[in-house]
Image (cartoon, helix red, strand yellow):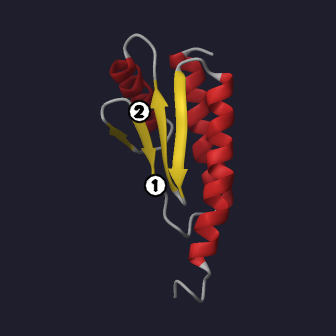
């Protein structure tokens, strides 16, 4: 199924696009430190004076909007969607995340 559905190629392509989108968020929002990733596994590091508290606030703001993820190290948003995620769903997830960052983390 993995080969038949070309999921590895899809993960590579969507991963590159997602990392580009996250890097653009880092450029727009001073509270974001770095975006990193491999395939469909990304980390978005939160900075500022209280990065753990800010990351937690972003997490809860996203949960209220329907996006769930985990925090790594207390201040790194970790996103790991399924390999079969629809592009529209992925775009929606990034929109939710950026809205929460803009609202709670400042721009």
Q: Residue at x 52, y 83 (%)?
A: 2
Labels 2 and 1 touching (C-beta < 8 A): no
At label 2, counting other C-alpha atoms closer than 10 Å, the crowd grade (few under 14, some 14-19, many 20 or more) is many
Nearer to us in this view, 85 or 64: 85
* Image location (x, y in percent) of residue 4: 60, 89
| In the image: residue 83, left or right of residue 49 | right
Look at the image and tell me in which quarter the C terminus lies.
Answer: top right
Residue 39 occupies which quadrant of the picture? bottom right
Q: Residues within 10 Å of mark 1 (few under 14, many from 20)?
A: some
Q: Callout 1: helix, strand or loop?
A: loop
Q: Which residue was labeled with disc 1?
A: 80
Q: Which residue is drawn at the image coordinates 66% and 49% (left, top)?
A: 91
Q: Marks 2 and 1, Cα distance to the nearest angstrom? A: 14 Å
Residue 57 numbered tag: none
Give the number of marks: 2
Percent of width and height locating residue 98: 60, 32
Mark nearest the camera among 2 and 1 is: 1
Q: Earlier in the sequence, mark 2 or mark 1?
A: 2
* Residue at 39% across, 30% down: 60
Relative depth, front residue between 106 and 103: 106
User: From the viewer's perspective, is residue 38 above or below residue 83?
Assistant: above
Image coordinates of residue 95 in percent, x first then y, are 64, 39
Position in image of residue 1 (x %, y %): 52, 88
SS for tag 2? helix
Q: Nearer the viewer, residue 62 or 83?
A: 83
Q: Taking 72 as reference, is 33 above or below it?
A: above
Q: Is residue 64 left or right of residue 22?
A: left
Question: On the image, numbered disc 2 is attached to which residue?
Answer: 59
- Judged from this view, the residue extending furthest toward the top is 49
């Amino acid at each position: 199924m993995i080969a038949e559905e070309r999921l590895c190629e899809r993960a590579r392509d969507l991963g590159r696009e997602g990392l580009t989108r996250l890097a653009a968020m880092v450029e727009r929002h001073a509270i974001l430190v770095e975006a990193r990733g491999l395939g469909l596994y990304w980390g978005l590091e939160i900075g500022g004076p209280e990065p753990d508290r800010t990351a937690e606030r972003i997490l809860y703001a996203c949960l209220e909007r329907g996006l769930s993820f985990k925090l790594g190290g207390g201040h790194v948003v970790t996103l790991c969607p399924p390999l079969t995620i629809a592009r529209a769903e992925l775009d929606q997830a990034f929109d939710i995340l950026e809205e929460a960052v803009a609202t709670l983390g400042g721009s």
